Image (spheres, rainbow, N blue to C red):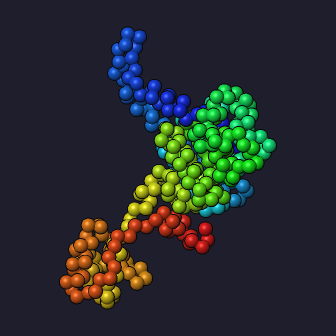
Amino acid sequence: MRVITTSTVPAYAARRRRKCRPAADARGRRDPDHGRRQKEATVTLPVETTALTKRYGEIAAVEDLNLSVPAGEVYGFLGPNGAGKTTTLRMLLGLIRPTAGRVRLLGAEPGPASLARVGALIEGPAFYPYLSGRANLRVLADHAGVRRTRVDAVLDVVSLTDRAKDRYATYSLGMKQRLGLAAALLKDPELVVLDEPTNGLDPAGMADMRVTLRKLAASGCTVLLSSHLLAEVEQICDRVGVLDHGRLVTETTVEDLRAGGALRVVADPLPNAREHLGRLFGPSRIRLDGTALELDVNPEQAGRVNAELVGAGFVVTELRWHEPDLEQTFFALTGGNPGAA
């Protein structure tokens, strides 16, 4: 386990509250430029890469990667196994050196100062099996120079307080993952980087991790996680970057990635219905999808489509708005198929 420890979420939230107070001088007069300076300070991206590249001989693991992770969001780094996700995270954390390009964490080059504000869990967590969860965290806290009072705080964040006295060897896989996350939170990070945090978890473990990560984001912490599990990214993340063969295919919000729905129509006879709707809306806005038509129109036009078809004598058996899910969009972007994932 590679853990870069940082500190507890409540303390970070307190710092944010202090920064939101109106600035004043020694006489209590408000600084008129404080709001402008505060706004300028908040535009720094927690993670930013420029033309980041990593090559192993002739093989490009990551190629010309330009990544931008906004503050206070859960960002999903999505891609199939071998796409270059873990390699990218290792470069962000200074664990491997890029072949070319630049990395900035919290507005600075990766180094002791910036990494002290980052918590990370790369690869599976590994602790002393004969020690309790609390004792394991105390060992890490002592090594990192963190007060032991932080241990109970992070155990509460990951909902392990009730099992803190139990030996690590008795923990389920999901509990082990959450303890690894707790270790990464010891120094109250502003940014948390996680490599496949839900990998291997059962549905209950995934749900627990999802709640914990959303709790972190709500407190003001930025979370960057890699995953090949499309459904989990769709439920956890605010924004995604899709990586394929070391290249960033797209970077957008989950909502925008799912956008582009269509009105699905099944009518008899279908070829004639397609021709009829083509005259109304234009042939380029109608696609044949198996035994149905997909119309590139607004959902509000469903009533008009139905009326036009029924009025022309067609039998309409299905008329509904179809919104593609993240999985469909992912395979369209990467040129893959569900069986290859």
Q: Is residue 298 visible?
A: yes
Q: Is residue 76 left or right of residue 34?
A: right
Q: Nearer the viewer, residue 38 or 234?
A: 234
Look at 59% across and 38% down and name the residue there. Answer: 156
Expressed as whole percent of the image width and height from the top left, the position of residue 134 reads 70, 37
* Picture layout, residue 113 above or below residue 121: above
Q: Nearer the viewer, residue 241 or 48?
A: 241
Expressed as whole percent of the image width and height from the top left, the position of residue 236 reads 51, 53
* Picture layout, residue 234 above or below residue 3: below
Expressed as whole percent of the image width and height from the top left, the position of residue 224 reads 56, 47
Q: Given the current orientation, which residue lies at the most extreme top position? A: 27
Quadrant in the rendering for residue 309: bottom left
Q: Is residue 293 left or right of residue 280?
A: right
Q: Given the current orientation, which residue lies at the most extreme right position? A: 130
All told, the count of numbered labels is 0
Q: Nearer the viewer, residue 102 or 68?
A: 68
* Picture layout, residue 258 above or below residue 274: above
Quadrant in the rendering for residue 281: bottom left
Q: Is residue 17 left or right of residue 156?
A: left
Look at 42% across and 57% down and name the residue there. Answer: 255
Look at 45% across and 53% down and name the residue there. Answer: 253
Look at 72% across and 43% down and name the residue there. Answer: 166
